[in-house]
Image (spheres, rainbow, N blue to C red):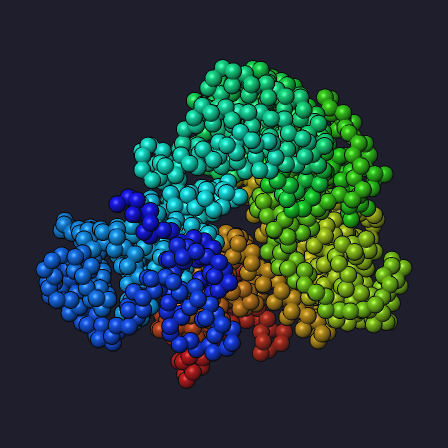
Amino acid sequence: MDNDTTVFLKPVLPHVFKAIKNVDIDTLMKCSPDEIRPIIPCLVRMALISPLDVTRYCTEAKKDILTLLSGIDLVNFIVSLLSIEFHTLEVDLKKEQQMRQKNGSQCTESFLIQKIVIGIANDFERSDSARRVRLVLSEILQMQAQLIEYNQNKNTNVECTIKPSELFDNDVYLEEITDVICISLAELPNLLNICDVVEVLLHVNKGPIIISWVVANMPDTLQEVAESLVVNAERGEEGGIRAKTLATLCDACPYIAAAVRSKAAAVSRLPSLIINLTLTHHQDDLVSFMSGLLLGSDQTTRAWFATFLRNSHKRGKGDGHTSLTKLRLELLNRLKEATAGVNASALLRLYCALRGIAGIKFQDDEVAGLLRLVTQKPPPTPAGVRFVSLSLCMILACPSLMAAPEHEKRAIEWVQWLVKEEAYFESNSGVTASFGEMLLLIAIHFHSGQLTAVGELVCATLGMRVPVRPNGLARIKQAFTQEIFTEQVVTAHAVKVPVTANLNSNIAGYLPVHCIHQLLKSRAFSKHKVPIKNWIYSQICNCTAPLHPVMPALVEVYVNSILVINNKGTNEYVNKPITEEEIRKVFRNSIFGANFDIQNKPFNPMEVDNGEASIEIDINKPTLASQLLLIYYLLLYEDVRLSNTATLIANGRKVKSYSSAFLSELPIKYLLHQAQKDQMSYGCLFSPLLRLLATHFPQLSLVDDWMDDQVFGDTCRHQVDVNLSEAAINEAFQSIEENPYKTGKILKAMLNKNPTDIWPFAEVFVKYFKSVLGDQVPRHIQELYREVWLRLNTVLPRCLWIMTINALLDINGNVKNVTITQENVLVDPLQVLRCDIRVFRCGPILKIILRILEASLAASRSQLSRHLLDKPLLEKSGQLNSDSEREELKNALVAAQESAALQILLEACLETSEDENKPELMWSLREVRSIICSFLHQVFISEPSLAKLVHFQGYPRELLSVTVQGIPSMHICLDFIPELLSQASLEKQIFAVDLVSHLSIQYALPKAMSIARLCINTLSTLLSVLPSDLRLELFQPILKSLVRICTAFPSLLEDITSLLLQLGRICESQASLGHCWNDTNILGEGAYVASDVQPKTKVLIAEVLCRDIKLTMSEIIQKALLNDKIY
């Protein structure tokens, strides 16, 4: 029978399948009868069925097919199959399918065939063509029903099996059965689905070959059938008959192998098939495809394939193990022939993935092949550098490569060769990042015992997450630390490595900066007294955008290595800080060069380092990245120094401190704004810089400034073509009152430029501040002047503030050449308000002064806090015994300064006699009040305690109507008015009642009403306890306040009326006594006031108060009782 099998069901040959698929008649004519045997059903149908195409070519082709089929006896059988009554068969088949759907495989009746008595195989042999078709279809439907039941119950305890088919078990009938299936599928497409039939045929004898024959007769269904076979596979199905079927189809049609493989990988099915198809049909991309499965971006696919490989390796049998063995054999053959290069690098990564991710243990021949490959010495090219890096990481990731002593010796000799050849590779390979840095980093991590960091470095280089076990690194660690790189060699070598030119985040790989960072972190330079300052300074100067992420971390560990003392020993060597002159050198060549003119900066002998000589670096045009890193270094240095001052002093260490004057020269704000605009390039530095700025320079992180910066980043609205020069600016401002148009044109031209372009004219521009205050200067010019000033404020704000303060300084005529400095303002921020009095009636310029005042107060606060940190309390002697006392004194000084500033501003809101005489000044006064109230509102919101302090100090009561209406946050005063009322001073009590009355009108709230009631009760109490002279002094000023309270809260009318009646009776009684009572002894002439009615006569205060009480009552009745407008 085996010999017969070789005759029956021969596989479909690829050229036959291609010919039938493409209807290539010429190729088919050249085929032998045995070769075309599988596709005879298709050819017979093509020859007999009338085509839609009636062209001459089609007619000739049909003749050729008939010629091809002539002489083949089997054709008669196919013709007889096509001659049966398919309509009747279709009806019966449909009934059979419905019955099977209802009753399943247990159904005993059949619409297709009568009862079989002699066995289905014998029946098939004796039957005619029509019955044969019915027998085959009946058997397929029966097996299909069993298959459905099996799939439904496979996850339950119900036992279901697919019984073998007697009909299909006879090999001799298989070809005829296959012909029947092909004709049935072709003639009954509505009832028979080829994918369903194929699923059934998987469970019959010679299923894969039968399926390939069926598909060959319907070649257009190949893709559909292949995808169906893949998708319907079980998740745990590694290979089996389904994989064999797909392999058979791919043998018949090789081009579909790639699509089948991709589909299987996409749905995570049939892993052994994927390997076999790759080995058979796609050996060219074997390494890349297998690497893609294990290292691709799809987490699910990676996990699925790695699990399959691991399980197949452990199991040692089955389809999975067989395919894995074939794969390893092929890879081993490639390994033996591989030479260092791109392909070898890919092969190494695949072997790393097989070991690290799939957990496959290498065999001896694989270990030997890998060690031979990784210890090769490649040519000095980028590909060579990449190969060597991967080889080094493979040795670290796979300790089994060094298990044998001779292997270990060979690997260590190779690493030693790398150390010697590193400079040669770096200079010739054309890559900035060489494996020399990686060698250094590995040695550094080994010395500091950071084996996890070694693992992370290995994983990052390999591009995969593989387990690097510390116990597996023990021998290589010993080799690195004792034989290859001692720590002293590491530090000495690292500092000699040239800095990376134009370092930025686009440069991949391991760089010198990684090594220096790690060595600084482990304090290796300090331990071996290796100076590193010049290297770090050089690298900072060689940075460009986008900023490399290691640079901020490098600056941080460098600063810590200078200032933070290691607990193990206080006498350790410390690194030197970057000098002010070196920092100036960078900024001198920037757009701020004029600010760092070397003639203006006397040489400071204290700046010479006693250990490391300065280096000359050619900085023609420093990059923004370099400037930002130096600013970050300075701010971080001062931050860490102040945090550790007490420790440093206690240990007797004197460290460098960068002066406030030097820090004020730096364009910190401008640079930070540039970083904010390009956070893609400087994102890693912007946040820590902003934190340090807000902490140490709050004056540079004002909200208004940031908002202005955003506005000025937009396009300019003025387009004026004017040539700017100092002479033109001087000329324009000298004729500001006579020809303001010329001044406006210059100012618009300045607005049209970038802030950095107009900064050189800042000094001459600010010089004319007082000119802008003139009576005849148009408001438009003042507004333009302010806009230009705000633009300049984005560049070097602190320099601009000092220039502005000096330009507006209002000094006595006797004193000449007084100049305010940065230090003066830090000590006394109220210097800002020593300005020309006209500022307080010029809204645009007042806004500038308030901006400077806000910044100066913030700077003073910060300076006092810095002073406390700079001068820690080491010995508790004298008046101060604790830091809390110093903190309280500092807070008291800050509160005094800020409240004084607010009092000066409130005083500026008072109406003067000059305001009354000039109507335009009244309008200016209204604007100034609005600006100042807005400023006070911001202050009160940020520091509510200041609101309390200012109101406890008190201010002119005529301003209460202005402040309560103009400052939205005045309602917070309701919280502390009871405390203010309880003060012993009559003046404060009067102020409190007046304040409550205005707040009641503005905020008619339940809380305001309860406070107002408290005021009435307090006044009633005071009325009964105060002596007569103080009683008159208290109640005279508050009568108007009582009217306002009644207007706001009519429900208090009764209490206030009662109070006024009582007060009125007392005053009447006192007035009736006249001059003879004790008023004279207490008040003397003060008991009298000039009469309003009769000139040159005096009346008693009590009489005047009586009259005022009556007027007050009349006013209350008018405004509160008879007021028809309740809301």
Q: Is residue 740 above or below residue 494?
A: below
Q: Horizontal and vertical percent for residue 906? A: 61, 60
Q: Which of the two residues, 42 or 312, is positioned nearer the viewer here?
A: 42
Q: Position of residue 377 (x, y in %)?
A: 63, 26
Please state which of residues 707 and 911 is positioned toward the viewer in this rendering. Answer: 707
Closer-to-camera residue (804/100): 100
Residue at point 45%, 71% (across, down): 62
The answer to which of 519 and 36 lies nearer the viewer is 36
Image position, residue 312 (x, y; %): 34, 36
Q: Is residue 558 above or below residue 973?
A: above
**Number of marks:** 0
Q: Quadrant of residue 1120?
A: bottom left
Q: Is residue 586 left or right of residue 1078?
A: right
Q: Is residue 184 visible?
A: yes
Residue positioned 77% across, 28% down in the render: 614
Q: Residue at x 76, y 54 (%)?
A: 756
Which quadrant: the C terminus?
bottom left
Determine which quarter of the picture holds residue 344. Answer: top right
Please say whether residue 566 is visible from this viewpoint: no
* On-image quarter of the N terminus: top left
Residue 882 at x, y = what percent? Answer: 51, 31
Residue 1070 sits in which quadrant? bottom left
Q: Residue at x 36, y 51 (%)?
A: 10
On screen, residue 185 versus residue 148, left or right, reads right
